Image (spheres, helix red, strand yellow):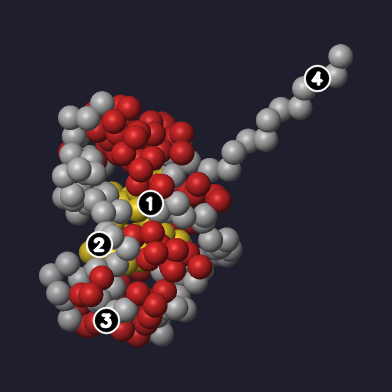
């Protein structure tokens, strides 16, 4: 009797929804912008930005699905931002199944997401049980994870063991309402880090001043030393 055909392997979410990217020889810099709603530029304006920016959308926003869809349709990658609402938050103390169910809900709200973005307090770096539950679930769904540099950065090592693409944010561009020049200095330092390590991730928001500073910086001499890349390209390298 003939051998039954093997079932086709399901594509990982990071591959299915990631933007095709040809790196070339230069180190990569991935810029993630958190959609801050009315505090930033209008969503349609951000979505039509002609740079390979990755946008992060909080899953507890009422228009999260619409926002993510808009970014994805315009050729951008999307990250699901871990929410702060009590009902949906990855706050720790949950069982592996509860965490898996929450992540299933996150990715149902933002089906185009290539991964999960941790909150700035780096909850995943501070709770090993929680991070292991999250990584187990992401291994199944095929999503990546992005968190913040903190301590020994155990999440990166554990993600590697779990086969989950992962990355650490090197620097925040506008957390303190930085000026145009300060944002450009952050980007210069990030470019230098990319040259050392091969890739770097930075994060900012969709406020107008941040987007203007990024657009201006891309014309600078320093910017020519790196290639801007969607986040999937940087975290797959780890």
- Kindly state the secondary structure of the residue where label 2 is placed: strand
- Kindly state the secondary structure of the residue where label 1 is placed: helix
Q: CA distance from mark 3 to mark 2?
A: 19 Å
Q: Can you give x and y, in whole percent of width and height, for residue 62 in the image?
A: 28, 60
The residue beneath circle 1 is 109
Q: On residue 202, which mark appears?
A: none
Q: On residue 171, which mark appears?
A: 2
Q: Is residue 52 visible?
A: yes
Q: Nearer the viewer, residue 105 or 58?
A: 105
Mark 4 Cα shell of 10 Å, populated few (<14), some (14-19), many (≥20): few
Q: Looking at the image, is 45 positioned above or below residue 115?
A: below
Q: CA distance from mark 4 to mark 2?
A: 53 Å
Report whether 29 appears left or right of 154. right
Q: Are marks 4 and 2 in contact (CB under 8 Å)?
A: no
Q: Are marks 3 and 2 in contact (CB under 8 Å)?
A: no
Q: Which one is closest to the eye, mark 1 or mark 3?
A: 1
Q: Earlier in the sequence, mark 1 or mark 2?
A: 1
Q: Earlier in the sequence, mark 1 or mark 3?
A: 1
Which quarter of the figure is the N terminus placed in?
top right
């Amino acid at each position: 009797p003939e051998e039954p055909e093997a079932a086709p392997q399901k594509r990982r979410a990071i591959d299915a929804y990631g933007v095709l990217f040809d790196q070339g020889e230069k180190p990569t810099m991935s810029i993630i912008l958190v959609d801050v709603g009315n505090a930033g530029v209008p969503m349609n304006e951000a979505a039509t930005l002609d740079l390979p920016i990755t946008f992060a959308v909080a899953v507890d926003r009422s228009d999260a699905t619409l926002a993510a869809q808009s970014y994805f349709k315009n050729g951008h990658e999307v990250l699901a931002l871990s929410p702060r609402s009590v009902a949906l938050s990855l706050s720790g103390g949950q069982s592996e199944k509860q965490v898996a169910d929450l992540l299933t809900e996150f990715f149902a709200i933002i089906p185009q997401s290539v991964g999960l973005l941790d909150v700035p307090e780096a909850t995943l770096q501070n709770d090993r049980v929680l991070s292991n539950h999250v990584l187990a679930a992401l291994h199944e769904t095929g999503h990546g994870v992005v968190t913040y540099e903190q301590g020994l950065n155990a999440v990166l090592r554990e993600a590697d063991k779990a086969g989950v693409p992962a990355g650490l944010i090197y620097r925040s561009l506008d957390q303190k309402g930085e000026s145009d020049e300060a944002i450009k200095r952050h980007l210069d330092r990030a470019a230098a880090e990319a040259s050392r390590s091969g890739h770097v991730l930075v994060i900012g928001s969709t406020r107008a001043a941040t987007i203007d500073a990024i657009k201006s910086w891309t014309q600078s001499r320093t910017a020519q030393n790196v290639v801007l890349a969607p986040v999937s390209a940087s975290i797959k390298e780890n």
